[in-house]
Amino acid sequence: MPSIFIVLFGLVGFGFGWFVYSNFIAGKIYRLDPEYVTPAHRFNDGIDYVPTNKYVLWGAHFTAVAGAAPIIGPAIAVYLGWVPALLWVTLGSIFFAGVHDMGALWASNRHGAKSIGALTTSVVGKRASALFMVIIFLLLVLVNAMFGTIIATDMVEYPSAVFPAWAAIPVAIAIGVLIRKKFNLLLISIVGVAILYFTIYVGSVMPLELPGDIFGLGPNGNWIILLFIYAGIASMLPVWLLLQPRDYINGAQLVLGLLILYTAVFITMPDVTAPAFNTNLAEGTPPIIPILFVTIACGALSGFHGIVSSGTSSKQLNNEKDARFVGYLGALGEGSLALITIVAVTGSLYAATGADWNAIYSGFGSGPGQTGFIDGGAQLISIGWGIPIAFAETMLAVMVVLFAGTTMDAGLRLQRYIIQEWGNIYSIKPLKNNYISTLIAIAACLALAFGVSAGDYPGDGGRLIWPVFGATNQILASMTLLIISIYLMRLGRPAKFVLMPMVFILFLALWASGWYLIEHFRTEQWPLVAIELLVMVTSIMVMLEAFSVISKIRKGESLNDKEDSDDEAAATSD
């Protein structure tokens, strides 16, 4: 079957989601109010709270949430069959991810741009909030540790990506300064993207490697250390100087890359060589239900998005109506990346026959992952557009690195916020310090990045961390949907369009967590066992607290906790 039908199915579905379903949710359920004064205006400090053009914020939000996950997840999951992967990416983006991301952005906006964990205090209670923040922190450690290892792997395997990936930093800083000085945004964007694509050409003809074993940890381990040094510094700079413009210009570059990939599909019209439903699974392959729904997390639904929506994006929301554009369209953008990944790794340009594809995908989790996207996508671009294969590979390798890198930038900043919130809650003065809180966040990530190993080299545990990340991510997504649902109930609005996705994914995520917990216990991966146990126990405790509040709401009982002023203002305005 031609791959173009996969593309058309997904894009038509995304079109329905944007033009029909998101309008319904934004207007009838969340009731986005353009007159509401956002925290970005009320608390404007020029550092974290900065009213931002919706196109710039979308670019920053999109690249922060996307990461490498919507590439790796689908590239692994297609082993189970491309049809289940396609259905979950498409339907998940429309009915799960978009509702989740826009809802987290809206709820945070109505609570002073607090993180989803902190605003849980107002919606459910202090105990639930404290537990929720533990889950969020653990997910951020998983995300940053995993992406650090993934970027390091790509730097080693694709040295042509090194120069353009690091050159994006000074370009972003220059763009941040120019935007601050009110230069023409379109002109800045065109020039910035042109410079970045020129650096990709330079990288393709001038690959770079580290000059030596800097930290004595081998190439991958050295890159991991350097990446976290950079991410730590970046996380403490004002958002307008690096994080925001880096995410924005990367977003513009990556959107252009997606357009090139999609048009290449229409030009080349490759056939699908992978099985629609794989019935020839290797021994030990996990069950498709529930594993599919946690293997593809980002690209269909991701709890990490709720952290970004409520942690950084809500602090930059210029107008509440922009929450639909930034949140829902950001989710569809990530879905489009997952969709083209399915095409890249299942098409005949990557593997000429079904037999070849089976040799590449010899088992679940043993496939090429992001390298499959890079190699398969490069074939699409090279044949479709006549672009040299070296340039195409460099372009896609940089795409993966930049996606993952911008997620690390935002992830370290969000970890710092949580540590500082703990410092405020428990009156621990050192935790309130930017430098100390950042160092603690980095130490936790490095401990996991080097503490989980496949036994090959330092920092090789990314694939082992992936299943725990996926399950934890979906548990967090269900918790976020639960909090949004309770907030809607407290405002007297229908919550079923948020509750139904919550129940579905919560059941599957807990099931998958239990399955992986047994596997990791059997293989003695103790750091992962500890994280899984802690996440499962705390999430169940949050649920019990939340269901208690729901019961009181349904019975019409008064709630003991006092809502904060933002919550009261939200209820009054509605």
Image (spheres, rainbow, N blue to C red):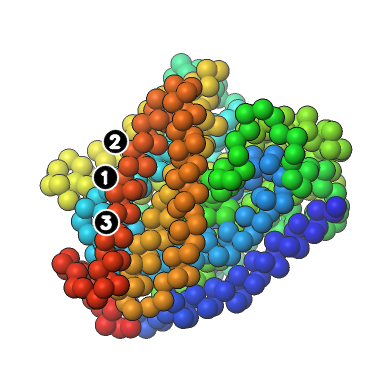
Q: Residue 545: give its label.
A: 3
Q: Quadrant of residue 210?
A: top right
Q: Nearer the viewer, residue 149 or 136?
A: 136
Q: Is 197 on the left or on the right of 491, as rendered?
A: right
Q: Quadrant of residue 128?
A: bottom left
| Residue 475 seen anywhere in this rendered image of the structure | yes
Name the residue: 47% across, 47% down.
509
Q: Is 258 on the left or on the right of 321, as rendered?
A: right
Q: Residue 529: give its label.
A: none
Q: Mark 1 or mark 3: which is in front?
A: 3
Q: Is 42 on the left or on the right of 20, as rendered?
A: left
Compute the Cα span from label 1 to label 3: 23 Å
At label 1, the amino acid type is Ile
Mark earlier in primary sequence (2, 3): 2
Could you say where residue 252 lies in the image, as x and y percent from the top left? 60, 58
At label 3, the amino acid type is Glu
Pointer 2 with pointer 1, Cβ within 8 A: yes
Q: Secondary structure at mark 2?
A: helix
